[in-house]
Image: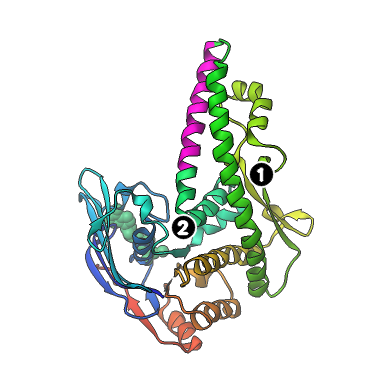
Amino acid sequence: MLRINRLKLLQFRNYKAKSFDLDERIIGICGDNGTGKTNLLDAIYYLCLTRSYFSRPDGQNVTHGMQGMRIDGEFDREDGPHTVTCILRENNRKEFLADNEPYRRLSEHIGRFPCVMIAPDDVELISGSSEQRRNFIDAILCQLNPEYLQQLIAYNKILQQRNSFLKQASESNAKPDEALLGTYDDQLGSKGQTIYEVRVEFMRHFLPLVLRHYEKIAEKRDGLAIQYTSQLSSSPLKAILQHTLQKDLALQRTSAGIHKDDLEIYIGEYLFRSQASQGQRKSLLFALKLAEWDVLRENKGFSPILLLDDVFEKLDAQRMHNLLHWVCAENEGQVLITDTHRARLTEQLADIKVGFKVIELGIKN
Ligand SMILES: Nc1ncnc2c1ncn2[C@@H]1O[C@H](COP(=O)(O)OP(=O)(O)O)[C@@H](O)[C@H]1O
Ligand SMILES: [Mg+2]
């Protein structure tokens, strides 16, 4: 069981100073556009994952004209009550505390308070670049496995060093230092292999869950097929790097590695990205996110907090009902859901026949 019971915001975006009692499992949040619904959900995401869902620099989360911000949350988890505090100092230094104890590293916090967000622009996950899909997968794996984040940080650091090396070697036109290059390739090869193996193992479990959720939401399979692709599936990275060296020198960057992995998605024999209808895209988006929620729940032994931002705009009433029934009635997790229409929100939640609370946001916060 994981719940956030209380949230206190200080100078966080449009909230100068505001507290929320979130003492229900199902919480509807309504208010006109611009009243701070998304900001409220993002504050919870921030507390759980140490950063904004919308990958904004920390400073942009501070109320305009102010300096520094603070978010406090009171949680209940399987092992008892916990407080989590995020402080962004005036010098932009970020601190995280759990039960008033500061973390040495922010990464130690990730995964302890799991949460999943579904927000309006998320279809980019399907139609955008492969980087979006890698970030999505990496964000899940970081919550599942703290060592994964360390491996990823180390890989990216070596990748940057190798790229600077390639740039220098190519600009100076001198023969590259083979010993140094060999060291980079060894390190990149070994870290890359570890990350690749974690991803392969994860996909084996995750992708069938995505298909199952898709079928439940869309009420049919649509010939959906998803495949994890990596250059490492054909040869070890070190061998590929030796093979691509001339090309890498010309490009002045490393063209092969786990930073090129992707999820290839097909509908029948066509690429999903170019063929799927709006409805199919939305169904797939929800399927990916609910599969994320599932794997986190299995791994942690309790349901992550689910943050649903403006999802009523996305699915038709029947699909929305099915989805809400599944997350709110068939499962135990806390759900916070926003909508601009109070009546629609209340009606949908009442239909599920579980206790809920509605918070109405005004113009003044
Ligand atoms: N750093 C900030 N300082 C002050 N206000 C902000 C900041 N960032 C965003 N806002 C304001 O927050 C409001 C948007 O809140 P948002 O949560 O997106 O609303 P909603 O989801 O209800 O439409 C906007 O009016 C925007 O100007
Ligand atoms: Mg919004």
Is residue 126 found inside the magenta-colored segment of the image? no
Q: Quadrant of ligand 1?
A: bottom left
Q: Amino acid at mark 2?
A: Gln
- Name which residue lies at 65% across and 26% down: 242
Furthest residue toward right: 269
**Residue 289 vs residue 128, the one in the foreground:** 289
Disc 2: which residue: 143
- Name which residue lies at 47% across and 89% down: 353
Is residue 169 found inside the magenta-colored segment of the image? yes
Furthest residue toward bottom: 353
Q: Amino acid at mark 1?
A: Ser
Ligand 2 neighbours mark 1 (CB distance < 8 Å):
no
**Residue 37 vs residue 134, the one in the foreground:** 134
Disc 1: which residue: 230
- Render colour scheme: rainbow
Q: Does 70 sit left or right of 210 as displayed?
A: left
